[in-house]
Image: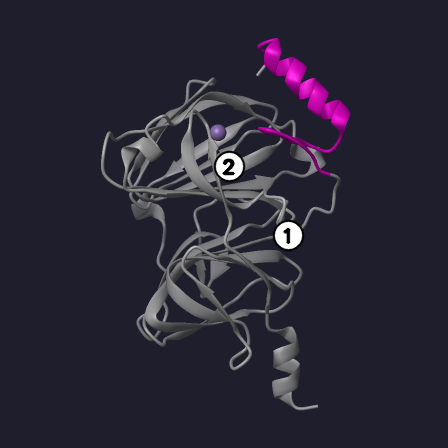
Amino acid sequence: MTRTAENTKTARRVVQTLPGMPTEDGAGVKLTRMIGTPQLPDLDPLLMLDVIRSDDPKGYIAGFPEHPHRGFETVSYMIKGSMQHRDSHGGKGLISDGGVQWMTAGRGVVHSEMPAQNDGALFGFQLWINLPAAEKMRDPWYRDIAATAIPDVPLEDGATARLIAGRWNGVEGPAPARATAPFIADVTIPAYGKQTIPLPDGHNAFAFVFQGSAQFGPEGEGTRVKDGEIAVLSADGALSVSAQAAGARFLVVAGKPLREPIAKYGPFVMNTAAEINAAISDYRAGRF
Ligand code: MN
C-alpha cells in the first residue's frame, strides 16, 4: 500500500466526543467533570478531569476546604485566577494565571484548595493521574510550578504550546518523572492553522478544547471538536489538528496505561476494596 495509507493507520483518531457533566464538589464549587463520569469513568492512567470556569464568585468562592487524598496525583492548572493550597505536611502555595501545582498524594495528604480572590473570573483544570500499585504508599510530594517555569515549544505558523509535562520538539516540561510518563500541553492554533502533536504509541490520550474549535485526526477524516468538549483519542500515532475559523486552544494529555485494578472511593484511589477500607480508617485515625 501507499505511504499515505500507512500514515493514516498510525495517526490518532477521535474515538468519542463528550460535553462533560456539570456537577458540584468541595463546599459547593460548580464544575464540569470531563473524565470520572458514568460516560467516561477513566482513561487509564487518567482518572479524572474537572474544569472550573466561572465569572461569578458564587460559582467558586466556597472552595475545597480540608479533605484527604491517597494513591494518586493531582495536577492543577490555572488558566485565569488564583487558588491557594495548604496541606497537612506544612506545605502551602499559590497557583495563579498559567501556573501549575503537581501534588503526589502517595500514602496520604490532607489539604485545602481555596480561591485566593473574591471576584473576577476563575478558570482552571484539575487532572488526576493514577500511581502504580508499587507507589501508592510512597511519600507525599508536591511542587508549585510558576507560569514562567513552563516552557514554550517552538512551533511554526503562529501556533504556541506551553509544555507542562513530556517532550516535544526538543523541549521538556517541568513535571516530575513518573511511571505513567505524562504528557500535558496547552496548545493554541490560529485560524485555519495545522499542527502535529507527537504522542507516544500505546499511551491513552485526550484533547479538551476550551476556545474555538478544531478538526482532530488525519487530514480530511478528522472529527470536529468544539469549545467545552473532550475528545478521547485512539491509542497509537501522532495527533493531527486543524483549527477552524476562530482558531483553537486546547489541552492535550496522554499517559502510559498501568493496566492494574482500580478501586475508587471519593478522594482515595487504590487497587482493592481492602486498601480503600484501610485508607478510610487511617484517615479517621489521623494517620495521614
Ligand atoms: Mn484536593
- Give the class, few, some or many, for how many residues have Cα within 10 Å of label 1's Cα (few <14, many ≥20): many
- Which numbered disc, 1 or 2, marks the residue that appears first in the sequence? 2
Seen in the picture, residue 75 relative to 251 is either above or below; the reply is: above
Element marked by disc 2: strand
- In magenta, the rendered stretch is 262-287
Q: Is residue 276 magenta?
A: yes
Q: Give the percent coordinates (x, y) of residue 72.
A: 59, 34
Quadrant (top left/top right/bottom left/bottom right) for the C terminus: top right
Element marked by disc 1: loop
Question: Can residue 188 be seen from the camera position used here?
Answer: no
The furthest residue to the top? 285
Name the residue tied to disc 1: 256
Compared across the picture, whether 210 is left or right of 110 comes to left
Q: Amino acid at mark 1?
A: Lys
Q: Which mark is residue 74?
A: 2
Q: Amino acid at mark 2?
A: Thr
Residue found at x 38% / y 27%? 63
Compared across the picture, whether 109 is left or right of 39 comes to left
Question: Can residue 133 be seen from the camera position used here?
Answer: yes
User: Which of the 4 quarters of the picture holds residue 94?
Assistant: top left
Q: Give the percent coordinates (x, y) of residue 202.
A: 67, 60
Q: Is mark 2 within 8 Å of ligand 1?
A: yes
Residue found at x 58% / y 50%? 181
Compared across the picture, whether 259 is left or right of 189 comes to right
Q: Give the percent coordinates (x, y) of residue 79.
A: 33, 47
Q: Give the percent coordinates (x, y) of residue 77.
A: 40, 43
Q: Is residue 79 magenta?
A: no
Residue found at x 35% / y 74%? 156
Viewer-nearest of discs 1 and 2: 2
Compared across the picture, whether 233 is left or right of 53 comes to right
